């Protein structure tokens, strides 16, 4: 493919000449040369019902033919109203109302504004401070990036950031490690949040935002036992809204409809995207509790909006994905296939000296690589281990997701797996062989000197 000329793509890929994807089906993507790749990452942990679902394309085409666009400030549409009714019972939010947008970053920006609007409507204009955690990821628009605690993404834009505040990561594997900014017990983490709220100006904290299970930045990290109940209690005590970022973990990815279901905690606001439409349409939403929605609406218009929010085509696609997840039992399949994949990965990699941890929930799993298992010391970033592993797995026909900086904001290597829920047992074996083979050949003790 040409890389210069009068018109070209500003590519996201760092690969000089990436393959051209032309078709996909199930868990497989095919490029223009006819080579097949097992999509063990679901793209960016997005595709849950599988590639190439004709029924979704038909629903999309039918809705676009009848009504492709109607501005949300003037109209509502049947697909939107129907989707809200159908997704509502699945959401771990009391009396939910959804605000549909085009993706996760937009949804997080919407949640932040809703939190502010809620406190203004209650006559508490001093509530503006929002806490998040280090080692988190909440999106790439400037507000969502500022909220995120992923240092490699923040660094180039640091001069524009600083509005939001951060607490320790809920990261038991690296609790207490120098530079990790992590704590390992529910009591420590809840006490830190409470102290931060009490230390802030009186009645100035608006919200606390966190991923129920941390996705890309730390790699499928679940919090310590008791964490979510303790954090929810602190937020309720101080009138702070609890915002759950389920962009990556929602719609069955962790083996439950939503990751908060693992703990029975119901946030005030829940942010969703990715698996909502399984990659077939850019779509996400904020689900606000009835109390938040009614309070904001009673005070007047919510001053916010996007051109492509409240999309009827997006809602139609989301309804069809929801139907497939439900009728095919794919959330339960995510749990079962995830347990199988985790067990097989641990069996294959248990004794590898560069594998520090293999973890996951449902079909959101991760492998954390270390230079020294006894000390959890990471490989230096200069070794570019993650990039080597991604390339080696791709050479074996397996696509993986990855992350760096988990150990201290610079060093730290993760391979993240999130295949479609339709992944077969034979494909699980191929994933294990591809990933483990890449680690076994690339993550040698001498990698830093190569």
Image: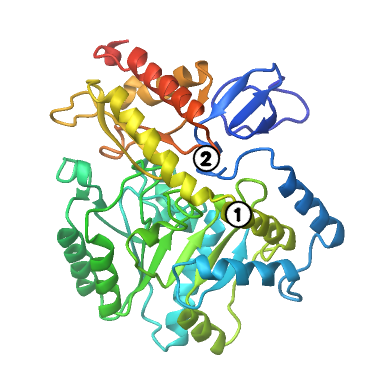
Q: Residue at x 26, y 67 (%)?
A: 229
Crowding at dot 2, Cα within 10 Å, few <14 / some 14-19 / many 20+, comes out as some
The structure residue drawn at horizontal position 57% and vertical position 43%, both measured from the top left corner, is 47
Q: Which residue ends up furthest to the right in the rendered image?
A: 65
The residue labelled by disc 1 is 327
Examine the rendering and report whether any part of residue 182 can be seen. Answer: yes
Q: Where is residue 289 in the image (x, y as percent from the top left)?
A: 47, 76
- Residue 379 appears in view: no
- Colour logic: rainbow
The residue at 60%/71% (across/down) is 304
Percent of width and height locating residue 171 = 25, 47
Tell me if 264 is positioned left or right of 313 in this view.
Answer: left
Residue 241 in the figure: left or right of residue 8: left
Instruction: Examine the image and state in which quarter residue 413 appears.
Output: top left
The answer to which of 331 and 282 lies nearer the viewer is: 331
Rendering coords of residue 300 (x, y %): 58, 87
Marker disc for residue 439? none
Q: Where is residue 294 in the image (x, y as percent from the top left)?
A: 52, 85
Callout 2 secondary element: helix
Residue in front for this viewpoint, 125 or 240: 240
Seen in the picture, residue 351 relative to 255 is either above or below; the reply is above
Residue pointed to by mark 2: 44
Where is the N terminus found, in terms of image quarters?
A: top right
Label 1 and label 2: CA atoms lie apart by: 24 Å
């Amino acid at each position: 493919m040409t890389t210069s000329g009068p018109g070209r793509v500003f590519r996201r890929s760092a690969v000089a000449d990436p393959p051209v994807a032309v078709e996909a089906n199930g868990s497989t993507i095919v490029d223009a040369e006819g080579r097949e790749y097992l999509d063990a990452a679901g793209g960016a942990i997005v595709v849950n019902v599988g590639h190439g679902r004709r029924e979704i394309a038909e629903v999309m085409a039918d809705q676009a033919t009848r009504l492709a666009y109607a501005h949300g400030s003037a109209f509502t549409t049947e697909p939107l109203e129907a989707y809200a009714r159908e997704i509502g019972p699945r959401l771990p939010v009391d009396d939910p109302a959804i605000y549909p947008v085009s993706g996760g970053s937009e949804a997080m920006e919407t949640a932040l504004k809703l939190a502010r609007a809620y406190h203004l409507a209650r006559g508490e204009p001093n509530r503006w401070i929002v806490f998040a955690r280090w080692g988190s990821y909440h999106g790439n628009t400037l507000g969502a990036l500022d909220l995120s605690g992923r240092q490699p993404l923040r660094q180039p834009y640091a001069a524009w950031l600083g509005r939001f505040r951060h607490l320790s990561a809920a990261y038991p594997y690296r609790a207490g490690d120098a530079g990790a900014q992590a704590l390992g017990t529910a009591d420590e983490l809840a006490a830190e949040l409470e102290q931060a709220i009490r230390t802030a100006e009186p009645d100035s904290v608006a919200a606390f935002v966190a991923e129920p299970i941390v996705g890309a930045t730390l790699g499928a990290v679940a919090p310590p036992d008791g964490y979510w109940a303790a954090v929810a209690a602190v937020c309720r005590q101080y009138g702070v809204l609890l915002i759950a970022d389920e962009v990556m973990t929602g719609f069955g990815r962790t083996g439950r409809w939503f990751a908060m279901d693992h703990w029975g905690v119901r946030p005030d606001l829940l942010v969703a995207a990715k698996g909502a439409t399984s990659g077939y349409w850019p779509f996400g939403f904020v689900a606000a509790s009835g109390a938040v929605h009614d309070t904001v609406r009673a005070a007047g218009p919510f001053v916010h909006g996007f051109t492509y929010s409240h999309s009827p085509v997006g809602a139609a696609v989301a309804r069809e994905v929801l139907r497939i997840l439900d009728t095919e039992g794919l959330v339960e399949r995510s749990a079962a296939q995830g347990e199988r994949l985790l067990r097989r990965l641990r069996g294959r990699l248990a004794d590898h000296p560069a594998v520090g941890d293999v973890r996951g929930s449902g079909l959101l799993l991760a492998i954390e690589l270390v230079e020294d298992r006894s000390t959890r010391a990471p490989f230096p970033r200069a070794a570019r281990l993650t990039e080597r592993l991604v390339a080696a797995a791709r050479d074996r026909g397996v696509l993986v997701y990855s992350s760096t900086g988990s150990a201290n904001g610079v060093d730290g290597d993760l391979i993240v797996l999130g295949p479609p829920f339709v992944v077969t047992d034979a494909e699980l074996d191929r994933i294990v062989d591809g990933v483990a083979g890449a680690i076994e050949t690339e993550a040698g003790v001498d990698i830093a000197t190569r």
